[in-house]
Image (cartoon, rainbow, N blue to C red):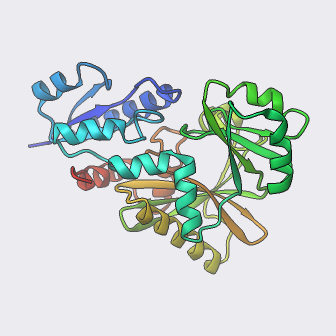
Amino acid sequence: MKKKILIISGGVSKEREISLQTGNQVAKELKKNRYIVKICEPDYYLLDITKKFKPNIIFNALHGQFGEDGYIQSILENIGIPYTHSGVIASAKAMDKEISKKIFIKHKILTPKYIKYSFDDPYKELNTKITKKFGYPVVIKPINEGSSVNVYICNKSNLKNRLKKLKTYREILIEEFIPGREIQAAILGNEKLGAIELKPKRKFYDYEAKYNSKAQTEHIIPVNLTKKKFNELMNISLKVHNLLGCKGVTRSDFKYYKDNFYLLETNTQPGMTKLSLVPEICLHKGINFIKLIKLLLDDASTNK
């Protein structure tokens, strides 16, 4: 008898649309393979739906806040039904860019230098801090968003105006800008799935470049690296996957500059849309979409 799969997608984060796309893509593939599938939102009805539907596994297709920061994971732990992807603590650590950076630095994983900036701090001191720490240009970003939501590259002249766009966040990160190649690597369990290079037509690989097909981002696979450098990239990705305590699949985002890999972040809920990178990396390795989904279902658990 085919298993019952409850897919949670949508939510209230800024990545809601991407989550809905992920959920629909996964549901479509599972239904084609005769699984019994139901999609629901992570709202008041989740517990009732779970009790009535009685799923064998919950597939977490949420992205962004409340979906990949440990919040929904804590609810799923209480429900007690095996669920896909990482657990409470790993999700919380990976989503918080400051905490994850501290872990990278502690374990000697190269990552861009940064300053944490509070909007309560006087702005006039910020320029001095930036100049002393790493100089311009800089990257400004929320501490706990995904998909490059509200991420901007700034120089000294436009920093103040760009910061105004992030004022709804109490604190943000300001990072040194690392030029170079955009390379992303995927891990599933303890398996090194592979990597992909991105050449966005836009200034950098932002939300539009990720999810709008009109952005015409070039995807390069296999990545043009020596065997030694490719192995180094994959070893860093597996190391950080394990350091954070991740389960299922993760995608780590790097800049490759002057023969060094700079880890930007690790994503515990990478997208599964038509333009998503993990399915593309898997396909290159000979793992089609349904096989990838089945691997995630096989890895589902509680008490993570």
> Could you say which is closer to the camera, residue 160 or residue 188?
160
> Could you say which is closer to the camera, residue 161 or residue 13?
161
Q: Is residue 278 left or right of residue 136?
A: left
Farthest-out residue, right: 157
Q: Is residue 140 left or right of residue 279?
A: right
> Quadrant of residue 20 in the image?
top left
Is 126 located above or below residue 187 in the figure?
Answer: above
Farthest-out residue, left: 1
Q: Quadrant of the C terminus?
A: bottom left
Residue 154: x %, y % from top left: 82, 39
Residue at left 65%, top 61%?
111
> Could you say which is closer to the camera, residue 102 or residue 234?
102
Residue 163: x %, y % from top left: 75, 30
Residue 177: x %, y % from top left: 77, 51
Q: Quadrant of the N terminus?
A: top left
Residue at left 24%, top 54%?
298
Q: Is residue 161 left or right of residue 194?
A: right
Is 130 located above or below residue 42 in the figure?
Answer: below
Does residue 30 appear anywhere in the picture?
Answer: no
Farthest-out residue, top: 44
Residue at left 81%, top 48%?
130
Does residue 253 appear anywhere in the picture?
Answer: yes
Is 189 located above or below residue 61 in the figure?
Answer: below
Residue 262: x %, y % from top left: 67, 62
Is 103 located above or below residue 142 in the figure?
Answer: below
Q: Is residue 264 left or right of residue 180?
A: left
> Quadrant of residue 185 in the image?
bottom right
Figure disc tally: 0
Farthest-out residue, bottom: 228
